[in-house]
Amino acid sequence: MKYEMVAGFETHIELATNTKIFCSCTTEFGGESNTHCCPICIGLPGTLPKINRQAVKYAVMAGLATNCEIANISKMDRKNYCYPDLPKAYQISQYDKPICEHGYVELSSGKKIRLTRIHIEEDAGKLIHKRGDTYVDYNRGGVPLIEIVSEPDIRSVEEAKEYVEKLQQVMRYIGISDCKMQEGSMRCDVNISVRPVGSEEYGTRTEIKNMNSITFIGKAMEYEFARQVDLIESGGRVEQETLRYDDVTNTTSSMRGKEDAHDYRYFRDPDLVTIHVTDDEIDELRAKIPELPAVKKQRYVSELGLNEKDAQNISKYRKIAEFFEEAIIGVKTPKTVANFIIGQIFRRLETEADKEEFATAITAQQLNELVKLIDAGKVKNNLEKSTLEKMLYTGKSVNDFISESDMAGRDDAALTELWQRAVENNPNAIADYKNGKQKAIKAVVGFIMKESRGRADAAAAEAKILQLIK
Amino acid sequence: MAEGKIKHYSDMLQKKEISCTELTEAFLSNIESANKDLNAYVTVTADTALNTAKAVDKKLSLGEMLAPLEGIPMTLKDNISTKGIPTTCCSKILEGYTPIFNATVWEILSANNAVLLGKTNMDEFAMGSSCETSCFGGATNPHNINHVAGGSSGGVASAVGGNIAVYGLGSDTGGSIRQPASFCGIVGLKPSYGAVSRFGLIAYASSLDQIGPVTSTVEDAAIVYDAISAYDKMDSTSQGRRGEPTALSIKNDIKGMKIGIAREYLDGVRDDVKLSIEKACEVYKSLGAEIVYFNLPALKYALPVYYILACAEASSNLGRYDGIRYGYRTSSYKDVNEMICKTRSEGFGDEVKRRILLGTYVLSAGYYDAYYKKAQNLRGSILNAFKDAFKNCDVILAPTVPMTAFEKGNAISDPIETYLTDICTVPVNIAGLPGISIPCGCDANGLPIGMQLIGNTFCESTILNAAWQYENAVGSEVFKESPYGVKI
């Protein structure tokens, strides 16, 4: 029999507020244990919580960015359970009146993963096991979280990964969380079950807790899917239980069964008043939400003539998209701008984190000036890239490299002559290079730069010389 | 006793008839002798008191004017957090716990140079009606030490009634200020929910708890209430006082004021108590007030609603006492679960355990709807019933307690019977209303009887006004002086 996977996600995301949800302690990650704490977030007797309005706003923005309905009236509840990392023995959360409901995340296939709800809650501290003892660090306790609960709409590991990536991308785009899975600012619980293909009924689900990497989410789901199918095929039954995933052995193991499930005794937190969010406030927050990546990508393709892949790359991170959109103002060919970004600028950004940060030497305005000159036919084809290269190298504007008289650029013949001359005039450096002294080639490039009064493209020149002396 | 004690001592200080240090020393030495009988104080803070007194004397020597509460010796119930001074809720589980911050009320009063004599006894975590669930043993009645001071703020009431504090702050969740005030023959005001900040008050039942003054006279209650009823940004449920300071209007004429009597409040009330209430009605009539009778059938739900909601909240509020961060921790354990279990089993007394169990039960899956949810709905009905009642009257007059102070040991032996004695005080907490208990006579054994005036939300000035007029009219007729304490 063929089986299909049915999965839903509970995703915890730490909100990027400066202070904690119920006190004024910093939310900064790390720090010496128990230094980001106060009487309120360690729950000393007599202390009272006071909600951080910014956390409410961020939660509303998360809801707006995921097509949720926003509740004008919601409230905070207590989720009672006893654990050393939870200093009040209850977590302040939202039970029956979450701030956002009935949203969805759209995958690239067009499939919508429905969101049941998004609610606000506080994070717990952390247990630290060392030297045979257990210590508690409450630095993280009271950091604001949202929990995004999806319907069981996910049918494959690919969909699961894309769902998590999409959530991560959107939450970063709207600036409410850095969603760093490795630092725990985004964590997923995966509810997973299997059923015969074609069946309408859900199988018994298990819940894999606290996944903090997209790769491991995929591996854990694959493992758990196979385990459940094997169990059923061999005549067994899946037990409803909570599992933990071990990334070393790539297996899941039981944390607790159904019979050990907590009775959280939810009730309204009497220390906190009703949360009101007016329609005006919702509109204000909606106005703060930038055009989201999926919409941007679509527009880049249909209106700006980018291909799918380029549109995807440019829209992936907010800073890139904003840079791009500023750089294309008034230019004839947005594609040229996209090519420059994806080609030369990306080459300087090694990691995804660098791309997201998008710290470039030049401003979008500077790129815009260059492309406008190109549009006007004032920069010769062979100088386009090298000019940008020089701009990126120095942070200077196009006019620093291309004077009025040079606007037509140097001709090919002159350049060929210059390279030739450089090889002939630097025999020692070339010999050194051939003997394995990599850096020696820089002397030859230096000659070219000097001869061209700094207008040559250093990288291109180096490549050309290497070609010539091969 | 129409003259307020606070003004009396403040005038003496201002006129330099006595120094603040002398006054403080007089109280401290009386505490030393009287506390053996009364067991009102669980911590005496002589150094703190004398340091403040010194500062006040310095001000006086410079010819400065004192604020109303400046230099007045007072006390705080031991569930009000005081930085650097143990705050135990009279529970073994908070053994050794010293707060690192001040409750907002103490922040306000200490900024006013209030002279803190010490922390006073209470039922463990404010759960009880006799002060006997305290891990330090109960406070006794300053009028007869074979009787209890009442609870849960028994220590404050005993100290104020026994003249070993000019005034004190208690907390009232279901009558914990008014009942002991009634038993000890003094004044206790439970303010409207939200009028006084709860920040730093160690919670019993958060939606019902309220800090309020315990004083000898109505005027004193007004002065203290005015000082502490400030909006506090640290407490989301705080609103502060509405309107002018109440002390400005306590002496207003009450001609035409409508005083309501809800018949249900007199059901099951002891005859002598009922008679005192009837006499009070006559006093009010003579002052030109009108007595209106009405029914308040929703009152019959008040006790079960109170015990369900209060215990539910308590079961959650008291979850934090696990021995991990502060307070008592059991001496031997195998793992963290055993440590928490043993710590709580050994650290909490029987009454606290009873209420945690009850509260856990009513919130449990499968029972929540039948108990907690139903109680919440009924809470709304009770509130509405009061709102309707206040369409036809300005204040409601009722007994504070259906009897006078219990003999020692009786309350502990039958907890359910004792719960029933809260019948007249809990409705006010459920509805978030202000209520004041003032003395209105004595029983055959010389134990004080109290009566309660209940006002609409944030109408403290109305009940204080009605209370002052009564107190002024009856004078020393109903007031009985305890043999204990400072008589200056």
Image: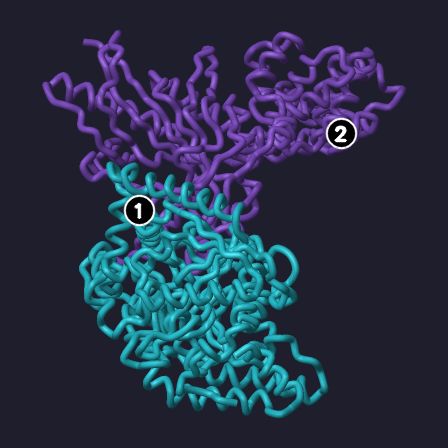
Chain colours: A purple, B cyan
Question: Which corner quadrant holds the C terminus of chain A?
Answer: top right
Q: Is residue B432 above or below residue A115?
A: below
Q: Residues within 10 Å of mark 1 (few under 14, many from 20)?
A: some
Q: Which mark, residue A81?
A: 1
Question: Which corner quadrant holds the N terminus of chain A?
Answer: top left
The residue sitting at 39% across, 77% down in the picture is B158
Q: Is residue B254 above or below residue A266?
A: below
The amino acid beneath tag 2 is Met
Which residue is the extreme one toward the right?
A405
Q: How far across and down, in percent of the image, does residue A372 sit?
A: 79, 17
**Mark with earlier residue (2, 1):** 1
Relative horizontal placement of residue A404, taking residue B202 as reference (left or right): right
Q: Residues within 10 Å of mark 2 (few under 14, many from 20)?
A: some
Relative horizontal placement of residue B316, taking residue A331 as reference (left or right): left
State the residue in front, A210 or A237.
A237
Q: Which residue is mark 2?
A: A449
The residue sitting at 47% across, 17% down in the picture is A106
**Picture quadrant where residue A232 is located:** top left
- State the SS at label 2: helix
State the residue in front, A375 or B229.
B229
